[in-house]
Amino acid sequence: MDAHLETPEYSAKGTAPLSFDWVRQVHTLGPTGTNCERAALRWAARHCKNAEVFLHATMELAAEAVAKCRKSVLLSVVAYPHLHSIIYEHIGELKLMDVFIMNTDNMVLASSTGKTPKLCATHPAPEKLIPASIERKFVTSNAQAAAVCAKGEADGCITTLCAANEFSLTILRKHGPVPMGFTIHGPLQATPASHPSFTSEFQNPNRREFHDTESL
């Protein structure tokens, strides 16, 4: 289930890879079991082995923590509904520093009863995976959706396969892993080794991607 790199580390022509050796904390969305946690652990293992991953109830709280610590970064996800608000709220403190692609965990529709749910807990991002006839209960993350379902506050959820198994929920449908973009935001005053050109990187076929090899 571990992610791996199918293509080599990329860099814009004439530049060295961006260094994140200075990072000591990676803040992202919790609780444990989220796709963001998985992405943060993998990114930290590759770029800043001495960094610790911190999980927050919302991405907004994670961004606030990073804004107060110059040796930390925020790992967010492009599907986060209010990522644009986070970027502009902290425009005087944080900047976009890295972007990569990694498969999410297998996204599933799960149930606490084994039957088609009437009320489904979901983060706003994947709520379109729920049939239109089912009522939504919005929560702060995919992992939280599974927890809410297990507590009986909803009889179904859209969550990750990992979280569904953790709470012993019945899988009704597997949507599979989703190739997802994750973003790294750090302090304006950070001084990494080099600053690759995003334009050049997007033209480079050796784009960096993490892929999950688990079969559906």
Image: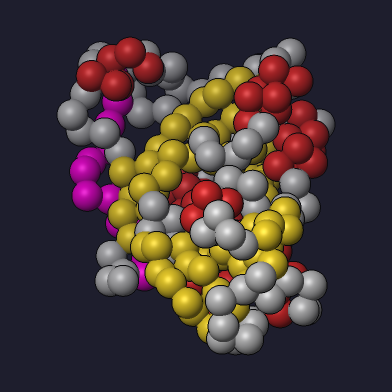
Q: Compared with residue 85, is residue 130 higher up or lower down, i.e. above or below?
A: below
Side of 37 where 66 appears, left or right: right
Q: Residue furthest left?
A: 205
Query: Can residue 76 be seen in this snapshot?
Result: yes
Q: Residue at x 78, y 79 (%)?
A: 151
Q: Quadrant of the C terminus?
A: bottom left
The answer to whether 139 is drawn above or below residue 61 in the figure is: below
Range shown magenta: 1-12
Whether residue 83 is in magenta: the answer is: no
Taking the spot 47% from the left edge, 77% from the top edge, the residue there is 172
Front residue of 33/164: it is 164
Is residue 3 one of those drawn in magenta?
yes
Q: Relative to the observer, which residue lies in front, 46 or 111?
A: 111
Vertical order, 208 against 141 (above or below): above
Vertical comparison of 103 with 146: above or below: above
Instruction: Please state the horizontal and vertical placement of residue 171, each as a whole percent of the image.
Output: 49, 79
Residue 29 at what x, y percent from top left? Answer: 67, 50
Outermost residue to the front: 133
Which residue is at 47% across, 30% downward? Answer: 98
**Residue 32, located in which quarter of the rendered image?**
bottom right
Left-right relation of 37 to 129: right
Q: Nearer the viewer, residue 190 or 126?
A: 126
> Quarter of the image containing the N terminus?
bottom left
Q: Residue at x 73, y 71 (%)?
A: 154
Majority secondary structure of magenta residues: loop
Position of 57 with respect to 109 (left or right) is right
Q: Pinpoint residue 82: horizontal percent, then vertical percent.
A: 67, 32
Instruction: Name the spot of residue 127 as percent of width and height, x first.
Output: 58, 51
